[in-house]
Image (tube, helix red, strand yellow):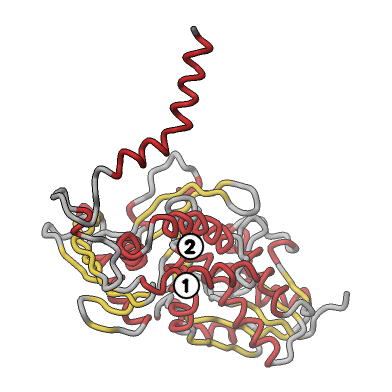
Amino acid sequence: MNKPKKVALAYSGGLDTSVIIPWLKENYGCDVVAVCGDIGQGADELNGLEAKALRTGASEVYIEDMREEFVTQYLWKLVRSGGVYEHKYLLGTSVARPLLAKKQVEVALRTGCDGLAHGCTGKGNDQVRFELTYKALAPHLAVIAPWREWSIVSREDAIAYAQAHNVPIAQSTTKIYSRDRNIWHISHEGGALEDPANAAPDDIWMLTRSPREAPDTAAEVTIGFEAGAPVSVNGQRLSGVALLETLNRIGSEHGIGRIDLVENRFVGMKSRGCYETPGGTLIYAAHRELEALTLDRQTLHYKQRLALDYAEMVYNGLWFTPLREALDAFFTAVGASTTGEVTLRLYKGNLEPVSRKSPYSLYSLDIASFTMGASYDQKDALGFINLIGLPIKVRAGLAAANSA
């Protein structure tokens, strides 16, 4: 295969993608187009990014603001699904990768690139997420994955390469955590976290206040939803980005959203990571409480089963697939009545529901009350129990006869 002459690189300015620019030019002799998506990682990561990419060899740099698209077209779909990976992980990195790869492909096609490159390691899930998106949107473009080709085998090697090529980086051999941040969360991996026997060091946490240092007074926050998507905080209607930023501030102050997880990667190994998702944790909790009011039992329970499949698909990078689109159609239909407000109480890393309200609530005080009422005849329960229990009764009788 001929070497690509112009390659669009998914560029973050972190250690891996920083060294990839000079490596691509040395080993492929190609022009490098650096593509960065602003999905809420913050000014610290974005400031100076264009100058850095150009200084290290990129011929063109594109920084695309995708925050509102990320929130409304990706995160809110995740919220509607209720998908959580392995009981804890709210999929902050997983759900962002298809969008970043999509934007990378769009820039590549617009600027005449004949190749795509990413900085994902050969051991991680992200290589799958990026490359499955490439296959869905631009299968004709060549794909370069330097971590599967070069002689660099560790982050220490990558740091040494960067130093030898005068590439400025924030990492050092004594502070070597791998982090991924966006408006939904931040992840922490590597260093002391690689051994699951080690407690997570206090200095890894960046978004959330320690629950021990959170305010001594509980706070309440009310989140409003329309058709399954959050639309307001404490009665104030906000854009998707502003809403999530507001809830991130509130959750962070009260130590909400920290998890420490040993997870099963799609590529077959176990890994350990720590995640902070303050606003997302509040939204998920409120959404669950609202669905408890608005969904009937069969629909709610079936949705919970599909949410497991959805979470696994997102984790595995299967975003641009017919099944994901079909599941989204189901969750959209089911969530049509998930409208209302939920108030949560936050205190030192914990949260609890205080109030749930919806115009579509299926909760009937007349039926649920312990006071006898016309809407529910308790005598009907006898026939219900007899019918449900019939197979149990027959089996018990057979067992008794056989033991006689």
Residue 175 shows in the view = no
Q: Are marks 2 and 1 in contact (CB under 8 Å)?
A: no
Of tags 2 and 1, the one toward the viewer is: 1
What residue is shown with label 2?
Answer: 91
**Quadrant in which residue 4 is drawn:** bottom right
Outermost residue to the right: 1
Residue 62 sits above or below residue 245 on the image: below
Place of residue 324 in the rendered image (x, y in percent of width and height, measured from the top left): 59, 68
Q: Is residue 312 above or below residue 36?
A: above
**Quarter of the image with the N terminus in it:** bottom right
Q: Which label number is shown at residue 229? A: none
Residue 76 shows in this picture: yes
- Horizontal and vertical percent for residue 217? 11, 59
Local secondary structure at mark 2: loop
- Residue 191 lies, in percent from the top left, at 48, 52
User: Looking at the image, which residue is at 87% across and 78% down?
Assistant: 2
Q: Residues within 10 Å of mark 1 (few under 14, many from 20)?
A: some
Q: Nearer the viewer, residue 134 or 204?
A: 134
As measured in the structure, the alpha-carbon distance from the residue carrying label 2 to the one carrying label 1 is: 22 Å
150 or 93, which is in the foreground? 93
Amino acid at dot 1: Ala
Q: Quadrant of residue 235?
A: bottom left
Give the mark nearest the N terminus, 2 or 1.
2
Q: Which residue is mark 1?
A: 333
